Image: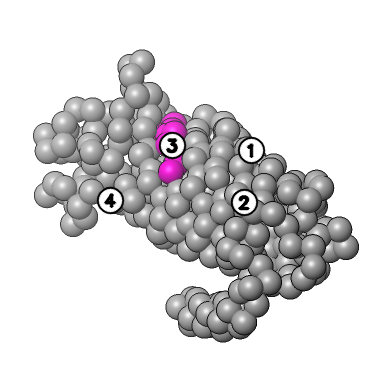
Amino acid sequence: MRFVFKILIVGCLVLMTSELVHAQKQNFKSRSSLGVMLGGSYYIGDLNQFGHFKNTNFSGGIIYRYHVNSRLELRGGLRYGRVEGYDADSKDPYRQARNLSFESQIFEVAAGLEFNYLDYKLGNNKYFFTPYMFIDIGVFKMDPRTNYNGEMVSLQTIGTEGQGSDLSDRNAYSLVQLAIPFGLGFKINLGNRAALSLEYGIRKTFTDYLDDVGTGSFINSAELAAQNGNIAANLADRSDGSINFTGERGNSATKDWYSMFGVMFTFSLGNPDKCHFR
């Protein structure tokens, strides 16, 4: 993965350097655009293993693009989304009995590259549409919570898998994590200064705790209550007692994912250059 990013960065620097020759033809503003994206977000993990678009919530963001040439754009953005998952929604009796749940807001900042499949430039009448793909690298802030006696409780601070106690060798997981967003889209110009895009992206994360269900195990309730408190013990195992849950609480072999997708309206930050196209 590091090698891939090095190749992308080197390629991007070469392309940007070549553009300095054409600096007088197009200024910074004419190459820059700003987009507003509205859509949905959802999560894939231990509490929703396969249900794409299940429990979709509102998401939104602001995306900046810099036009390097007709096939490549640099991009960076700020996004907000909300994700959630419920064992009660599962068709698996085991997961229904486990009865865990969570919801989390996500604040994401990311930057990367956008590749156009066809020649394209915002404001150009000839090259006015294209499918595209993108890959970014970014960080996001999460805060998994759950409803407990009518109140939302932050799960990271209480240690449902014994984090921060003698019952586990793990400390509390970080609420700020790395992500690799990537996906596909389609964009089409709306006149000389605006464009419309449809975009779907999914995020590879490097944490198993977006849903607070990670690599830890079910711990004896009395021992967990003695060290991390009664709330931690009650939320670590919310089963109805029909199954005696032991071992791992989740699937330690996979990390959690989340998706953000939607419709984006993009506006040029400068006057389009009609004389030159790159």
In the displayed structure, does residue 93 sit left or right of residue 218?
right
Q: What secondary structure is found at the residue carrying circle 1?
A: strand
Among numbered discs 4 and 2, the one appearing first in the sequence: 4
Task: Give the number of the mark in front: 1 or 2.
Answer: 2
Q: What secondary structure is found at the residue carrying circle 2?
A: loop
Among numbered discs 4 and 1, the one appearing first in the sequence: 1
Against 110, is 50 above or below? above
What residue appears at the point 35 percent right and 39 percent down from the top-left corner? 143
In the image, what residue type sits under mark 3?
Gln
CA distance for labels 3 and 1:
15 Å
Among numbered discs 4 and 3, the one appearing first in the sequence: 3
On the image, numbered disc 4 is attached to which residue? Answer: 173
Among numbered discs 3 and 1, the one appearing first in the sequence: 1
What residue appears at the point 33 percent right and 51 percent down from the top-left corner? 176
Q: Residues within 10 Å of mark 4 (few under 14, many from 20)?
A: some
CA distance for labels 4 and 1:
29 Å
On the image, numbered disc 2 is attached to which residue? Answer: 269
Against 5, is 237 above or below? above
In the image, what residue type sits under mark 2?
Leu
Q: Residues within 10 Å of mark 1 (few under 14, many from 20)?
A: some
Which contiguous range is marked in magenta?
Answer: 98-107
On the image, numbered disc 1 is attached to which residue? Answer: 39
In the image, what residue type sits under mark 4?
Tyr
Task: Give the number of the mark in front: 3 or 2.
Answer: 2
Task: Give the number of the mark in front: 3 or 1.
Answer: 1
On the image, numbered disc 3 is attached to which residue? Answer: 105
Query: In the image as oriented, which residue stretches furthest toward the top?
Result: 150
x, y percent for residue 180: 50, 61
